[in-house]
Image (cartoon, rainbow, N blue to C red):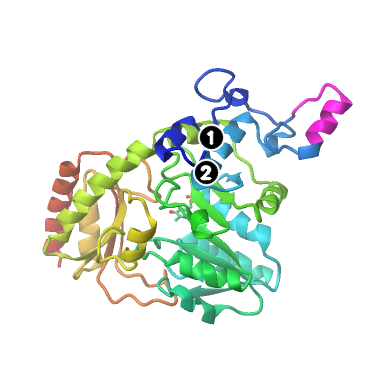
Amino acid sequence: MSSKNKNTQLVSSGRKKAYTHGVVNPVVQRASTIVFDSVSELKEAAKTRGDKTLFYGRRGTTTHFALQEAITELEGGEGCALYPCGAAAISQTLLSFLKSGDHILIVDTVYEPTRDFCDKILAGLGITTTYYPPMIGADIKEYIQDNTKVLFLESPGSITMEIQDVPAMVQVAHEHQLMTILDNTYGNGLHYRPLEHGVDISIQAATKYIVGHSDVMMGVAVANKKYWPTLREHSYLLGQCTSADDAYLALRGLRTMAVRLNQHEKAAIEVAKWLEQHELVDHIRHPAFETCPGHEFFKRDFDGSNGLFSFVMKTGNQKAIDAFLDSLQHFKMGFSWGGFESLVTANLSMKGLRSQTGWEHGPVIRLHIGLENAEDLIADLQQALAIYEQHL
Ligand SMILES: *Cc1c(COP(=O)(O)O)cnc(C)c1O
């Protein structure tokens, strides 16, 4: 399977006849109870406890198996657990492997709810967290304690987009028997496959590019051979499952992910290049641009970029930011990203979002470039930046 082109794989994966019953897409199989006709049938099903066979609804149905197979193939792992959202995939994966007294290392540029989960929930369970600077590389060694269990990475980092030297860090982690987990929502499996770089578990908010249409919440975690049996069993015990309808929509989104990403990537680079020339803009935080910390690791390890990037203003204030946001027509204010629509968020500073890394620059504006025409988006930004300037 691995010899297949990734685009071809996105179209063909998870389409066994057992799942599709001979049509193109898998049947939406909604179920709680699975019924067995005989003791021997029940015993047979109990042997694998729902590993790609029907056992009980929480273990999934053929619709889920189709999606799980497709995502496992995409990321290149042993198996894929499904969660009701990306935040659940992160929290439940961590809970599946940690116990009281353990210590974890989390990148300082982590997605904010991941930080809050560590500080507000793991701390209460007696699990301590140290945040490390995103560009630390092999020096992560200095942060490892006797009770450190997990190295958690997110690359690029949230909002400020630093790309980590994953292979160097994973090597140190494994020398110290740490498990490694990476939030790969940006890398999406087509552009970056963490397991190929030695990471043990790759997590994605499928809510973003896999679903691609802003209409389903879902999380996925793909584990290697070593960690898959525990991840699978513990996710089940933690009660993690998704509806067959959502699994169907996620799989449908996956089929067109490559073409959508191509368009997002092209338009985002066009918009970012325009912004780079703008007199109010200090620099661009887009992994494909040299001004992005870790750009060299992006060039080395990634196969492409997407619609998400940030730009840093030379100066600013909250009034200018608010006027800028209010004047945008195509860019809507909203959380999340990865859908067909353009979005914008802005931070006057990174205070409160970082504990180890300072921020010596101006305001950060993050864009998600949707599938609209890039020239329309540039015109929108042009008029909004003029309004920004009026408030300086
Ligand atoms: C959105 C996001 C999540 C959380 O996903 P939800 O499905 O919204 O819970 C996790 N990590 C990253 C990097 C994200 O962008």
Front-lying residue, 165 or 260: 165
Q: Nearer the viewer, residue 198 or 124?
A: 198
124, above or below 269, in the image? below
The residue beneath circle 2 is: 218
In this picture, residue 326 sits left or right of residue 29: left
> Is label 1 in a helix, a strand or a loop?
helix
Q: Residue at x 60, y 34 (%)?
A: 64
- The answer to whether one can see residue 213 in this image is no
Q: Amino acid at mark 2?
A: Met
Residue placed under numbered mark 1 in the picture: 246
Q: Residue furthest right?
A: 39
Quadrant of the rendering where the C terminus is positioned: bottom left
User: Magenta span covers which residues?
Assistant: 34-46
Secondary structure under the numbered disc 2 in the rendered image: loop
Q: Residue at x 70, y 53 (%)?
A: 230
Residue neighbourhood size for the residue with mark 2, other residues' Cα within 10 Å, grouped as few (<14), some (14–19), many (≥20) = many
Q: CA distance from mark 1 to mark 2?
A: 8 Å
Helix, strand or loop for the magenta stretch, by majority: helix
Whether residue 281 is visible here, answered yes or no, is yes
> Do the CB atoms of the residues marked 1 and 2 lie less than 8 Å apart?
yes
- Residue at 48% x, 30% y is 12
